[in-house]
Image (cartoon, rainbow, N blue to C red):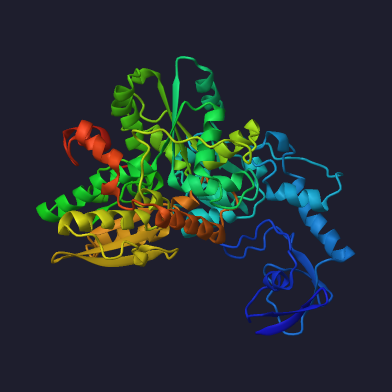
Amino acid sequence: MISLFINGIEAQVPDGSTVMQAAAAAGFTIPSLCSHPDLKVKDNCQVCMVDINGELKTACSEAAAPGMVVKTFTPQVIEAKRASLKKILKVHPQDCLNCPRNQSCELQTLAALLINREVEVKPFNLSRDTSTPSLVRDPSKCTLCGRCVEMCNDIQTVGALEIKDGIPQTVDGKPLIETKCVMCGQCALVCPVGAITEKEEMDKFLAAVADPDKVVVTQIAPAVRVAVAEELGLPTGSLDMLKFAAGLRQLGFDYVFHTNFTADLTILEEGHELLQRLEEGGTLPMLTSCSPGWINFIETFYPDQLDHLSTCKSPQQMFGALVKTYWAEKMGIDPAKVYSVSIMPCTAKKFEAARPEMNSSSYRDVDLVLTTREIGKLFRIGGANWDKLEPTPFDSLMGAYTGAGVIFGASGGVMEAALRTVYEVVTGRALADINLTMVRGFEGMKEAEVDLDGTRVKVAVANSLGCARKIMDEIKAGTSPYHFIEVMCCPGGCIGGGGQPIPSTVAKKKERIGAIYEEDASLPLRKSHDNPEVKLLYADFLKEPLGHKSHELLHTHYHPSHK
């Protein structure tokens, strides 16, 4: 530990800390644009200037030293901060009212604190890139912080973005759709402004609600359930789900369901597929197929390894296929009138819903995907008073779920849910402890081994595409020791998806994961095969896992990308 002084207050911090960290320990926040708690120091924006022993230096990059005297508030410091900020604002569009990040923009917040309004503006005249169904990139708003490039290259290892001539841009200046972008949206999560955002489609939802010939149905992903409260200014996981359902009905949804239902269904299909491969010598290790950003990644970077993927569609797409077949038939509703909306934590889900493979119901299975941020914005527009809103139940028939479906939202959750069911199917016995903590957590790689009555099955969990690349290199080299591998595209799993509330730091993601496991532990049913409505679905419609109807509606195959 070392001792230094911040604004006259002595701070004790570990040796190797930065001045910014030391200031935080003393109770002072130093604003910055390029600094991010989960990314490397960049020292690009120069907004974190402080006085260190009489010299102006950047707090994010300067190492704290014993006896150092730091002042974060002097006229010279404020003027230096303003000068750095004005340099950024001079070339930044002043169209805050039209920006998706209005009121959640780090630059806007800093400008409100530091800038008198006399800033000469000469914005870059750069065109917006709307080429993908998931993301919009507006280089005119870029602050040159470099966060997006680090996320895309170092953490996700995709390499769709680069810094060229000091400016973050797409590789070779191509439209985003022509790069190796997998549309995970992690770049949008770390962008301090609105230079990269999800493609907003709320108007499509409003048009569907206004159409008297449409029956508007929604499914809510497990990761959305815990994070949507943040969009409403509430603590993570604190929004009562029955009030959530009531709020959705007020927006105009006719029927409200849980994606957790088809998460449970996915486990039945995927678990039996794993057992079939183990018994019949199928391609191993089997890789999960729930995450569309991950699917885009393997199609792009490892197209010769696609046989390792489970053929199961994601829970989103399973729900979409069933709501326009099984559910519509049971309800006596013309499937042509069903408008299927999913509320997802993920920007890549927008791309997934538009894939040509996803129309096994004879219609587009999922008509529209809204992110957590979009549904939060709709709620704010609607102006519901959550204290006064009367709770309403979720709809039945495809509404029941277990704790196993809930934990799909966290890294390791799919694996844990699968093992709870697979163990019982094989052995006829329940696990002594279904809390499989060895596959939980925020580590990049987790592994476990399960004894299925003499067959030892080795499993692994890859958290982020950077970890997925390591797994895939082992598989390609023939050295992978595993039978079953869960891959989640986004760090932390779906709770850290590209459409989640901002900020989505590691600390915030851990809060969301905690809320997910709390709900799992509180439920009476915690294994997917115990879901009564899944049992009814098989009895009335699908007949059996991996059966003819299941393969027709719930399974698919993916294809090499030629990017």
Q: Using the rendered view, name the quadrant where residue 385 is placed.
A: top right
Determine whether 479 is above or below 151 in the image: below
Percent x, y of residue 229: 57, 46
Place of residue 314 in the rendered image (x, y in percent of width and height, measured from the top left):
34, 42
Nearest the viewer among 190 and 517 is 517
Is 334 left, or right, of 127 in this rendering? left
For the point 74% across and 59% down, the residue is: 47
Q: Can residue 323 be seen in this view?
A: yes
Labels in figure, total: 0
- Estimate the x, y position of residue 421 in percent, counting from the top left: 25, 54
Q: Which residue lies furthest to the right in this view?
A: 75
Is 296 left or right of 92, judged from the image as shown?
left
Q: Which of 89 and 247 is in front in this view?
A: 247
Q: Nearer the viewer, residue 298 or 278?
A: 278
Q: Is residue 500 above or below residue 156?
A: above
Q: Is residue 320 left or right of residue 53?
A: left
Give the answer, above or below, for where 335 lies relative to 162: above
In this rendering, position of residue 239 left or right of residue 440:
right
Residue that lies at the very extreme toward the left in this rendered image: 280
Q: Quadrant of the N terminus?
A: bottom right
Using the rendered image of the protein, determine whether residue 304 is visible from the camera's viewpoint: no
Q: Quadrant of residue 450?
A: bottom left
In the rendered image, the residue lying farthest to the top is 213
